Amino acid sequence: MLLPGYGGASLAEVPRSLLAALGLREPNALALERADRVCLFLVDGLGAELLRAHPEAAPFLTSGMTARTLTAGFPATTVTSLCTLGTGLTPGEHGMVGLMLAVPGTGHLLNCLRWTHPDGLTVDPDEWQPATTVYQRAAAAGVEPVYVGPAQFEGTGLTRAVYRGVRYVPADSVDDRVARVHDALRERRPAYVTVYYGDLDAAGHMTGWGSEEWLRQLALVDDMARRLAEGLPPGSALYVTADHGMVNATEKIDAESVPELADGVALLGGEARARHVYARPGAAGQVLDAWRETLRGKAWVVSRQEAVESGWFGPHVRDAWLPRIGDVVAVPHTDLAITAPTRHRIEALFTGYHGSLTAAEQHVPLLEVRP
């Protein structure tokens, strides 16, 4: 099976290499050249395979600029990749190992993207993800990191978990984001600015990657990248990357209504392409056998121990994070989505999904532009 390529060709190497390019004492596994100012343009859902399939919609991003292909890590999902980019650590080290994770000892799930959980349960982002961020390290070294993104995300649990140490600059429109990035790059030297765009991923979920709406969003991303590049001050570098790719589901299995997939299950976490299945006490073996048999030929189904020992979450998983991983981890390798329509109604209606270990979901671009 395809495993995440942790090491010199993964998202985990991007943030430390960017800091090294700015002159900080950090590993530079990607061998990035020095720059006085760095902008990281993070496009949610811009998979490398997807971008290569539609150069006509993205002439700037596919125009021959310096380009590499990196591996997102497992699961290939926003919360995990944002935390990887925010810490320079693999998922097994930073602990954000999925979208919906069991909060140990509570019998409840935490939605790590929306930071939602049942009333009476409190999850402190600083405790859930305690690692020092690259932004905190940058600030300690005299580089004030700036994050430009939607106003609605400022101060959220996920933002606190993965972006501690940044100066958050809210900007909702593309025009405002481009302007705020250029302002931040000119304010001081050295400068480290991250800007986020999420509507490409949203279009892919609802209408599928390659759809008319998705292609329209890709063209907007391409134009935004061009405008960011055109306003770079001398001595700057723009890097464009993504958190994951995507596949369009051609088959869906309702894990709530198939008895073999529901029996013995206490909590169904993760997401449709990277399921964390938490078994009732004493039922882990039964659940593993049933999921393997039911999804045979369609998904890799492994135990927690097998996933950890195979390096899915990176070369090392902290003991404290092990209970967050499902007793069973189910990862489709066909275009299958494992849905839960009662508990996650909107997700069950999606066309595009991500999370798995396939190249379409794992491979992300790292594009470099210098003035």
Image (cartoon, rainbow, N blue to C red):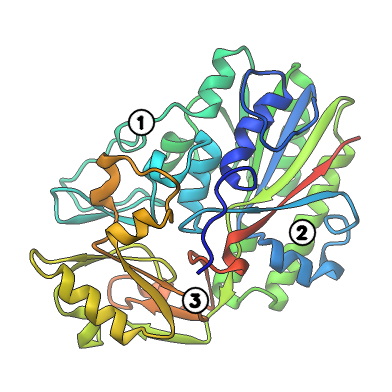
Residue ID for mark 1: 130
Secondary structure of the residue carrying numbered label 2: helix
Q: Name the residue rendered at 66%, 35% in the picture.
A: 29
- In this view, 304 is above or below 234: below
- x then y, percent, for residue 203: 61, 68
- In this view, 289 is above or below 70: below
Q: Is residue 87 left or right of residue 183?
A: left
Q: Point out the image quarter for the C terminus.
A: top right
Q: Name the residue rendered at 52%, 53% in the picture.
A: 73
Q: Amino acid at mark 2?
A: Leu
Q: Residues within 10 Å of mark 1 (few under 14, many from 20)?
A: few
- In this view, 79 is above or below 146: below
Q: Amino acid at mark 3?
A: His
Marks 1, 2: nearer the viewer: 1
Q: Name the residue rendered at 63%, 43% in the picture.
A: 8
Farthest left residue?
Answer: 282
Question: Reading the chain from its start, which is encountered first: label 2 or label 3?
Answer: 2
Q: Is residue 22 left or right of residue 332?
A: right
Tell me the distance, in whole angstroms, between the alpha carbons under discs 3 and 1: 33 Å
**Residue 360 visible in this rendered orientation of the protein:** yes
Label 2 near label 1: C-beta < 8 Å? no
Between 353 and 264, the one nearer to me in the picture: 264
Q: Name the residue rendered at 58%, 61% in the picture.
A: 362
Marks 3, 1: nearer the viewer: 3
**Residue 157 visible in this rendered orientation of the protein:** no
- x then y, percent, for residue 330: 36, 71
Tell me the distance, in whole angstroms, between the alpha carbons under discs 1 and 2: 36 Å
- x then y, percent, for residue 204: 60, 70
The image's mark for residue 333 is: 3
- x then y, percent, for residue 275: 35, 67
Residue ID for mark 2: 220
Secondary structure of the residue carrying numbered label 3: loop
